[in-house]
Each structure stands twice: as structure tokens, then as C-alpha cells.
């Protein structure tokens, strides 16, 4: 359904004295998402996850230059098409209730979302009631304002707002950390259900465990690019290809809690070679010379010259 090819995002900024500065924050990024699939995008803070979502939706700030290709349902996703499809065929499940209109009752917002997505007025009312029932939101909740919702209810309203329409691609930017585990699990289950009904889901998260709970594939982001796109079972089968993905896996509490030493390079100081080279146990001179290209190892793409079948 969605194919992101060689995506790049560069910001033009002005420094002291009005000197222009270009900052490339996403480069060579590839990602495929099919109908019925949950693809998790996992990466630490600043790796470019939200910018990927914004690039797909066409809501990057004006000083961002996008290169590469995004193809949606076989057709190039141009800015015009993005404007046309946003909220209709491609919907965002935002990070927090702060994205809802604080002055509008919840029911009206879900209703508005359904109308924006193209549902006729005659159907919208019934569909909104159905969606409230589906997400265990009692009908009186319709009359509440966003600030009156509990954390769990707020997540359900956000999912309902995206699920009420006919959007086939849903992008969930990670729920704010600090949510109760039950709420997280419930939201993840809702996303899985929507995929099982045939939608394509991109789940953006820091939380590898959450990702593995529901995702079919996990795209591992690092300093603005994908290092590996692994199948969820590759983690548990020990089939991971990239040393960074392996390190992330070992950093989970149940796998030894071994931290990955060092930090991700900042967009202002990216190395010429492999982005992970300075933290990698397998590093050799060749790694420092050129950025490794994606190549297929055991059926999945990875960006490491040492990864072999
Ligand atoms: N408008 C902007 N101008 C310049 N740089 C930006 C802008 N927006 C984001 N960036 C930079 O782009 C990089 C990626 O940001 P992004 O928000 O996509 O990260 P993220 O992976 O979503 O992080 P988090 O997990 O913290 O949400 C960061 O280094 C960030 O500072
Ligand atoms: Ni983000």
C-alpha cells in the first residue's frame, strides 16, 4: 500500500549573521507497508520517526526539502495528493489529546472526522455511535471536552477519531510515555485489530517490546535512516542482522538489560561511513569509508557490510 523509497528530509535554517545552514535529518530511508500489516518504526529520540510520519502526511514545516519517492497505492504521493488524501485515506493517530480541539466536545470531533473522511451526513451519526461502542466509550462521553477524559479514554478517543473514517493507512505516533501498561496494551490491540480488518498501520514507538507485541515487521531507525527491517519473529529466533538491532534486543530487561554504549550521532555531525560505526563491536576500516547500502540478508534488508546469510 505504501512504499517509501530513498526518502531524504533536509531543513534549511539561518544561523547567526544570516548564514544559511542545511541540516539533513533523514537520508536514504526505505520502508514498505502492506494492507493488513502493522509495521513498527523503532528508534531513539531524534532518529527521525515523527518526521517520517509528517513526510508521508505532507505536514512538514515549510523549510523542509523532501527528496526521494513516496508511493501510495501504486501512485506517487505528490503534495496535491497528500492534501487530498490526508484525513481521508491516510490518517494520523496523534501522540496526545493536545491534538484534539480543546473547546469542542468529543462526540463532535469524532463526527467531524467522519465527515472529513467522506462519510455522508446521513451515515455519520450511526457510524459515530458504533465507533463509541466499539471502543468501549459510553455515549455520555460524547458530551465531554478533551480535558475531562481519563488517560485511557483519551487514547480510545484518538484511535476512534482515526478509525471512524475510511482511511486505509493509519499512522500512530507513539502514545505519550507514562501511560498505564493496560492502556498501552489496549491501544496496541486496537491497532492490531484494525490491521486484521485490512488496514495498513505504521506504529511509531521507542518501545521495542510494545512493537513486538503487535507488529509484523520492525523497522529500526538510527540517525535518520533505517538500519534493518526485521520480521517480528527474527527477534525471538535470534535472526537479527544488524549489530544495533541485536544491541537493542539485549538492552531489554528480560535479555540482560545490557545498555548500548555511546550515543547516536547528531544530524550536525554525521560520519561518512556507517552511522553506527563508533558504537559497533564489529567495526572495521571498511565501515568508516562509505555508508553501507541496504542489501538483503536472510530475506530482509539490512545496512551492514558484516551482515551475512
Ligand atoms: N523543524 C525542524 N528544523 C530542524 N530540525 C528539526 C526540525 N524538526 C525536527 N528536527 C530534527 O530532526 C531530527 C529527527 O526528529 P524527529 O522528531 O523525527 O525524531 P523522533 O525520532 O520522532 O524523536 P522522538 O522519539 O523524540 O519523538 C531531530 O534531530 C530533530 O532535532
Ligand atoms: Ni517523534
Image (cartoon, rainbow, N blue to C red):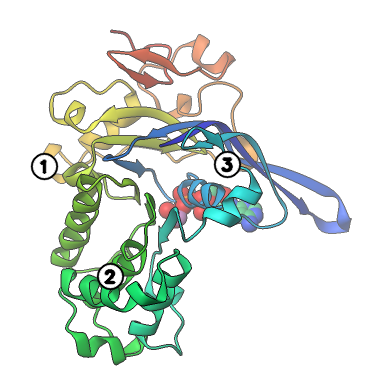
- Circle 1 sits in a helix, a strand or a loop, which is it? helix
| Foreground disc of the pair 3, 2 | 3
Relative horizontal placement of residue 103, taking residue 23 as reference (left or right)? left
Work out whether residue 154 can be spotted.
Answer: no
**Residue lying at 53% horizontally and 50% vertically, measured from the top left:** 51
Q: Position of residue 126 (x, y in %)?
A: 26, 76
At label 1, counting other C-alpha atoms closer than 10 Å, the crowd grade (few under 14, some 14-19, many 20 or more) is few
Instruction: State the separation of the CA atoms marked 3 and 2.
Output: 29 Å
Quick one: which residue is furthest to the front in this view?
Answer: 122
Work out whether mark 2 precedes mark 1 in sequence or the reverse, and give the earlier one.
2
Work out whether residue 297 can be spotted.
Answer: yes
**Residue lying at 39% horizontally and 21% vertically, measured from the top left:** 302
Tally the marks.
Answer: 3
Task: Say which of 289 and 198 sits in front.
Answer: 198
- Circle 3 sits in a helix, a strand or a loop, which is it? loop
Relative horizontal placement of residue 15, taking residue 284 as reference (left or right)? right
Tag 2–tag 1 contact (CB < 8 Å): no
Task: Say which of 34 and 223 sits in front.
Answer: 34
What residue is disc 1 on?
254
Question: Which label number is shown at residue 155?
Answer: 2
The answer to whether 134 is drawn above or below residue 197 in the figure is below
The answer to whether 54 is drawn above or below residue 96 in the figure is above
Work out whether mark 3 precedes mark 1 in sequence or the reverse, and give the earlier one.
3
Instruction: State the separation of the CA atoms marked 3 and 1.
Output: 41 Å
Instruction: State the separation of the CA atoms marked 2 and 1.
Output: 28 Å
Question: Which label number is shown at residue 77?
Answer: 3
- Circle 2 sits in a helix, a strand or a loop, which is it? helix
The answer to whether 93 is drawn above or below residue 264 in the figure is below
Please tell me in which quarter of the rendered image ligand 2 is found: bottom left
Q: Quadrant of the N terminus?
A: top left
At label 2, counting other C-alpha atoms closer than 10 Å, the crowd grade (few under 14, some 14-19, many 20 or more) is many
Relative horizontal placement of residue 255, taking residue 227 as reference (left or right)? left
Amino acid at each position: 500500500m505504501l512504499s517509501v523509497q530513498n526518502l531524504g528530509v533536509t531543513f534549511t535554517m539561518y544561523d547567526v549573521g544570516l548564514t544559511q545552514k542545511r541540516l539533513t535529518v533523514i537520508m536514504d530511508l526505505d520502508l514498505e507497508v502492506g494492507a493488513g500489516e502493522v509495521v513498527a518504526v523503532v528508534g531513539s529520540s531524534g532518529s527521525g520517526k515523527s518526521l517520517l510520519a509528517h513526510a508521508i502526511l505532507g505536514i512538514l514545516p515549510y523549510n523542509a526539502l523532501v527528496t526521494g519517492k513516496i508511493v501510495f497505492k501504486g501512485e506517487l504521493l505528490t503534495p496535491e495528493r497528500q492534501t487530498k488524501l490526508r484525513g481521508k485515506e491516510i490518517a494520523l493517530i496523534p501522540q496526545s489529546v493536545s491534538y484534539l480541539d480543546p473547546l469542542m466536545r468529543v462526540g463532535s470531533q469524532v463526527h467531524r472526522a467522519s465527515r472529513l473522511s467522506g462519510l455522508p451526513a446521513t451515515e455519520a451519526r450511526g457510524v459515530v455511535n458504533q465507533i463509541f461502542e466499539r471502543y468501549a466509550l459510553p455515549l455520555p462521553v460524547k458530551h465531554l471536552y478533551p480535558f475531562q477524559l481519563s488517560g485511557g479514554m483519551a487514547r480510545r478517543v484518538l484511535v476512534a477519531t482515526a478509525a471512524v473514517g475510511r482511511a486505509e493507512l493509519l499512522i500512530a505516533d507513539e502514545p505519550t510515555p507514562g501511560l498505564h501498561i493496560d492502556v498501552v496494551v489496549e491501544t496496541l490491540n486496537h491497532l492490531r485489530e484494525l490491521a486484521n480488518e485490512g488496514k495498513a498501520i505504521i506504529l511509531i514507538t521507542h518501545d521495542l517490546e510494545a512493537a513486538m507485541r503487535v507488529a509484523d515487521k520492525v523497522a529500526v531507525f538510527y540517525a535518520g535512516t533505517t538500519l534493518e527491517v526485521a520480521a517480528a519473529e527474527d527477534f525471538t529466533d535470534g535472526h537479527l542482522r544488524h549489530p544495533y538491532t541485536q544491541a537493542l534486543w539485549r538492552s531489554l530487561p528480560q535479555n540482560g538489560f545490557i545498555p548500548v554504549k555511546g550515543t547516536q550521532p547528531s544530524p550536525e555531525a554525521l560520519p561518512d561511513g556507517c552511522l553506527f560505526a563508533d558504537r559497533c563491536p564489529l567495526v572495521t576500516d571498511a565501515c568508516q569509508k562509505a555508508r553501507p547500502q541496504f542489501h538483503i540478508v536472510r530475506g530482509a534488508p539490512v545496512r551492514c557490510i558484516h551482515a551475512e546469510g
